[in-house]
Image: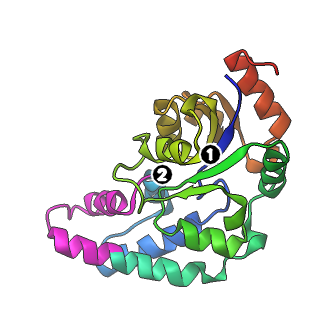
Amino acid sequence: MKLDAFIFDLDGVITDTAEYHFLAWQALAGDIGITFTREDNELLKGISRMESLEKILEIGGRSGDFSAEEKEVLASKKNDHYLSLITKISPSDILPGIKELLVAIKANGLKLGLASASKNAFTVMESLGLKNNFDVIVDAKTVINGKPHPEVFLTAAKLLGVEPESCIGVEDAVAGVEAIKAANMFAVAIGPKESFPLADVVYSETGALSFEKVKELFEKENGDFE
């Protein structure tokens, strides 16, 4: 199988907006009497806004205290706070090695897609100055099912006009890697090796990513040495 495209997650891979998400969720949790820690925040990696809210309500023992409408209001309140925090994002917030990797991917004639659980992917990519680098951006507004369901990665591949098996997905969340593998893509994970048993290759940080090395590993796995 020939390599046709790379599909990236956003948060924790292209840039690190995790701190802004944490601060916004912590503020919301405090407003409704829930203590929300950095350790708790790890449970939210790679899942949607409403799923994150449900986790926080569960942590605080308040799962049954709000109607569906009230939960929507709470989620919107969190997002408003998050949007105010990310106004300061700039190209200097692109994670190490990512800009060079994107340039190498395009220089080799491959397609680039973004598959994000965020509803603010377009805003963040615009602020980073990267929106025009990507052929396709798929976010939580575009799909029905969140990660670990493969829909967001499959949608990106379809819009790119490539087969899922010809794609490399790059993620930093366990749910994201599960989504990549469920989509029958080659999975590159960023983070501790022990956290990603399903990944095809794991790098401790984005700065360690190498286009040639990842491509070589993909071709070895897929028997394509062109």
Number of residues whose C-alpha sits closer than 10 Å to that of mark 1, classed few (under 14), some (14–19) or many (20 or more): many
| Residue 191 visible in image | no
Q: Which mark is residue 95?
A: none
Nearer the viewer's eye, disc 2 or disc 1? 1
Residue most extreme to the top = 223
Q: Which residues are magenta?
A: 47-75
The verdict on residue 41 being magenta is: no
Mark 2–mark 1 CB contact (< 8 Å): no
Which residue sits at x=56%, y=33%? 163
Q: Nearer the viewer, residue 137 or 45?
A: 137
Q: Nearer the viewer, residue 138 or 43?
A: 138
Which residue sits at x=78%, y=71%? 92
Q: Which mark is residue 7?
A: 1
Which residue sits at x=50%, y=61%? 38
The residue that mark 2 highlights is 46
Q: Residue 159: percent from the left, percent from the top?
A: 53, 48
Relative to residue 26, is residue 224 drawn left or right?
A: right
Q: CA distance from mark 2 to mark 1?
A: 15 Å
Residue 31: image quadrant is bottom left
Which of the image's four quarters has the C terminus?
top right
Q: Residue 183: percent from the left, percent from the top?
A: 48, 33
Q: Residue 217: percent from the left, percent from the top?
A: 75, 25
Lower position in the chain sequence, tag 2 or tag 1: 1
Q: Amino acid at mark 1?
A: Ile
| Residue 205 visible in image | yes
Residue 190: image quadrant is top right
Q: Residue 222: percent from the left, percent from the top?
A: 68, 19
Q: Main secondary structure of the magenta part?
A: helix
Number of residues whose C-alpha sits closer than 10 Å to that of mark 2, classed few (under 14), some (14–19) or many (20 or more): many
